[in-house]
Amino acid sequence: MEEIDEFNVDDFEEFSFDINETRKEIVSTGPSSKARKNASDKYKDNAKIFLETMDIFDLKNIKKSTYKYIYHRDGIPIPEKGEQIRIRTQCQLNLISVILAIVSRHSQIEELTIATYTLNRESMSILMQLKNAGKIKKISLLIASSYGYRDPKWKAEIEAICIKSGISLTFAWLHFKITIAKCGNNYYQFEGSMNYSTNNMAEQIIFENNEWLYDHDFNLINTVMKDSENKALEFIC
């Protein structure tokens, strides 16, 4: 593949772009701990302003490392129709930043479906507030049942939040990391090793705008994986 662009973001991230027809690859190296501290202070105020435009005012669960990616939300690559983007990264990126970038581009997500092993308080807080503000019309969550022993207190909190906010929630024995989002005639799907949490391990994501793939995974997550006859599933709401 031919390299077509390379840029730096304040020396905290370095990305290189490769493209072959509709495929694009992004490789980034993680910033140092000192750089992360300086960046979080620099970007925090701007990120807060953006979050308030999304009607997100409860910021107590948002991590400092997330502010940088919210600040650079327009730099998060979002695929055009028929385009696939492959991302390799070792930065403290929570997938919720990708959701915020999609909302920033389209103003609203009509339907969001997430199958994930981990969904931390930061991500849940932002999703709940986006839903309550009408920025996401409908949310369906399929989350790993292992929360029952990994963090039973947080599992109970997730259940209460979803019931209160009108979010569909099912627990299942899974290790999926798949997200699909419908925005008009754009059908986003991304999957990979990354969860809705924050760590600095090397991760990979495949991000597409593909209606066929969206429909396939929508059926997989909302129909096949939520078969009411499957006793291994726990339907909450």
Image (cartoon, helix red, strand yellow):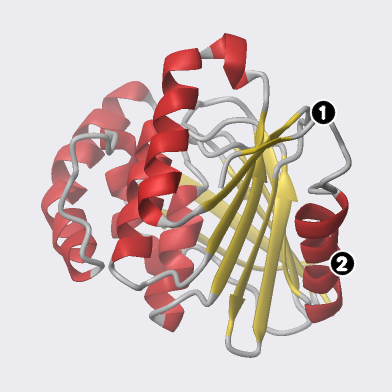
Q: Which mark is residue 232?
A: 1
Q: Determine whether, in the image, residue 124 is placed left or right of residue 191.
A: left
Q: Position of residue 197 (x, y in %)?
A: 49, 33
> Of discs 2 and 1, which sits in the foreground?
1
* Callout 2 crowding tier (Cα within 10 Å): few <14, some 14–19, many ≥20: few
Give the image quarter of residue 166: bottom left
Q: Determine whether, in the image, residue 71 is placed left or right of residue 138.
A: left
Q: Residue at x 36, y 38 (%)?
A: 122
Q: Residue at x 82, y 46 (%)?
A: 228
In the rendered image, the vertical position of residue 70 relative to residue 212, given as above or below: above
Q: Position of residue 187 (x, y in %)?
A: 68, 77
Give the image quarter of residue 62: top left
Residue 23 appearing in the image: yes
Q: Residue at x 39, y 26 (%)?
A: 32
In the rendered image, the vertical position of residue 172 relative to residue 13, given as above or below: above
In the rendered image, the vertical position of residue 99 relative to residue 213, given as above or below: above
Disc 2 or 1, which lies upstream in sequence?
2
**Residue pointed to by mark 2:** 216
Q: CA distance from mark 2 to mark 1?
A: 22 Å
Residue kind at label 2, given as amino acid type? His
Q: Residue at x 65, y 74 (%)?
A: 79
Which of 164/201 is in front?
164
Q: Position of residue 102 (x, y in %)?
A: 48, 70
